[in-house]
Every structure is written in structure tokens, then in C-alpha cells.
Amino acid sequence: MTDISATIIPPEESKGRSLFQLATIRFRRNRAAMAGCVVLVLITVFSFFGPYFINHTYDQVFPSYVTIPPSLEALPKTNTLGDVMAGVASRAKVELKEFAVDGNTFTATIHSEQTIDPRTTRYFDRANEFDNTQVAATEDDGKTLKLSGNVNREYFFFGTDANGRDMLARIMLGGQISLAVGFLASLVSLAVGVTYGAISGYIGGRVDNVMMRLIEILYSLPFVFLVVVLVVFFGRSFILIFLVIGAVEWLDMARIVRGQTLALKRREFIGAAQALGLTDWQIIRRHIIPNTIGPVIVFVTVVVPKVILLESFLSFLGLGVQAPLTSWGALISEGANKMQSAPWLLIFPAIFFVITLFSLNFIGDGLRDALDPKDR
């Protein structure tokens, strides 16, 4: 008798993998998609958690630092503090006799022909450059005061806008609103469009004809008119923004899914599912929708930046995010108007927007390849 050698397969290798696990493995092998995920996560962390690590808020105004270019140096510079102090003394209607700076503290001597009210120190604290101004000594029956206080050192790594607000804090806030509106509106269009398109394409006949005519009617309605009507009835709010955009963007999604469904319902596995007695909804949920995920995911990655631009358009018309709130689209709009005098107002929000756009495109390509039924 001849011995037949048997190959022993380890239990780990013989264990079958699900379709989701196979798709995950293919996605992880795509370096561009993984890099896009990492960058998108970093931008999300920067936008949502960054405000907790900076001292400025998005609506804090610095009158002394209007349209300041980006810099890694602390402001104000020591050589400019003398002129600032002289200006404050002039507004307080006193004469500046002496002024000196030692690190983050300052000393000053002011004089007036009349007795100086100690509350005059409030004028110095109102300036962005000084803080905690106190009267250290009184001379000449209150006509001469020696002051001491702290010098406020501020950092504006991304510069400031025309109102003196920190661009770093505003870009973080803009990322929160843009990403939230983009993803939430895309989820609305995804849920409505995929379900609507799958039902229309699978059932077909008169139902498909009526449902497609409804989409054409909605296409004919002006987008701005629809937004104005909804704002009049429901009021202006953040939630309404992504609901309105999602309610319009699902039309394209529905047509894409319908086209995919028309091709899928003639496949053999759909006929096998019908022969097994599955209902129409079960076939749509288990077979039609999962097999349209590839094109749908790719389309979603295109919808997100499109939604961000639509939100900025609504804000420009006064129907979206209003000041002091902002978004990347609104910041880009404002920066475009001052591109020559203050280019950083356009460059920084545009960089974050473009990087987010590329990341979403890489992620979409990776998901398309991973979820493609032909590769299973």
C-alpha cells in the first residue's frame, strides 16, 4: 500500500474570512488610502481638539493686531512697546515720563498738572499689550504715578484677520463646521438616495417612471429658492443647513444607484434569491444595496467637498453660518477678497480644504477597490 502524504493546514489558515474582512485587508494594502485616513484623522483632531490647547477663542478680537501676518515670534516686539505706551498715555490725557521693559514686566512714570485718578490704570489694561497695571508709587501729591504691570505676549502662527481675530482659532472652528456639515449632509443624501434609487431601479415599470419624474421635478426647483422657503418656515439653524443640502444632494445619488440596480437585477444571483422566495425588500437590502457600495462610496467622497462649498455659498447669501461663526468655505471667500494685501487669509484655509479633498479622494479610491464585488 502506498502512503499518501497529507498536508496539515493550521487552524488559523483554514478558518474562512468574511467579505468584510477581505475588504479590510485589501483596503489596508492601499498605501494612498491609508495615508488619506491618517491625514483626515489628523485634520479632524486638529479641528475638534485644537481649541483646547490654544489661549485664543474664535471670536476674541485683538484691536492692536489687525491683519498681522503669520509669525513664530511673540508679539508685541519690545522695540514697539514705547510707542504703544505713549499712545495709551495720550488717550488717558497724561504725560509719559519714563518707560522700561524687563522681560515680561514693565515700569512707567506718568505725570499730569492735576491729581491723577488711580483708575487711570484701566486705560493701560484695555490695550492688548499690557495687563495687571498697578500703581507702584505716588509722588507730587498724586500728580506723578509710577506704574508697573505685565506685558502680554501673544502668538499668531496663522496671523490675524481684518477684525484682529486669530486665524488659527478660526480655521479650527471652520474645520469643525465644514467637516460636520459635509459628513452629516452626505449621510442624509446617502441614506435617502441609496434607498430611493434601489427601490426605483429594482421594482421598475410605472413605479420607476413615477419616481424618476419626481426627481426631475425636484431638479427643476431652484436650490436657493428651496433654501429660502425652508428657512422661512423652520428658521435659520445649523441643523437646517445640512438637512437642506442633504435633501438636494440625494438626487444625484438616487440616479447613480438606480443605474447600478438596473444592471444588477438581471444577474444570476438575483434570480437565485427570487427562486429562494426572498421578498423584494430582502433582495434590495441584502443584495442590491451592498453591491452598489463601491460607486456610492466614491461618490460620497466627491459630495463632501461639494457640500462644503455649498455651505459657504449659503453663508455668503446670509442663509448659512453667520459671524462670528465661520467655515473653511467662508474663510476662503473672505480671503479671496484680500488676496493681494493679506494672502495668508486665503492660503491657510485653502490648504486645509485641499488636503481634506485629496484625503477623501484617496480614501474613496481605496474603498472602491476594496468593496468591488468583482475582486471578491
Image: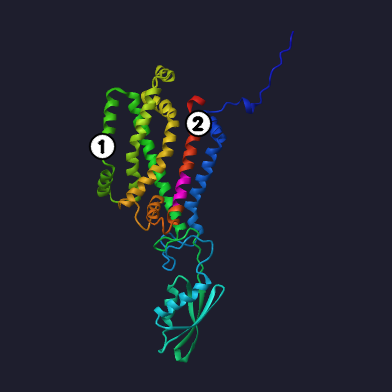
Q: Position of residue 26 (x, y in %)?
A: 55, 32
Q: Residue at x 37, y 58 (%)?
A: 324
Q: Secondary structure at mark 1?
A: helix
Q: Residue at x 48, y 73 (%)?
A: 131
Magenta stretch bounds: 349-356
**In the image: residue 227, left or right of residue 264:** left
Please tell me in which quadrant of the rendered image residue 269 appears: top left
Query: What type is the residue that disc 1 sits on?
Result: Ser
Q: Secondary structure at mark 2?
A: helix
Q: Which mark is residue 220?
A: 1
Q: Nearer the viewer, residue 8 or 251?
A: 251
Please tell me in which quadrant of the rendered image residue 252 appears: top left
Please tell me in which quadrant of the rendered image residue 338 appears: bottom left
In the rendered image, residue 352 lying in the magenta stretch gets the answer yes
Q: Position of residue 254 (x, y in %)?
A: 35, 32
Which residue is the site of mark 2? 369
Query: What type is the residue that disc 2 sits on?
Result: Asp
Q: Would you place residue 88 above or below residue 111 in this image?
A: above
Asked if residue 311 can be seen in this view, the reply is: yes
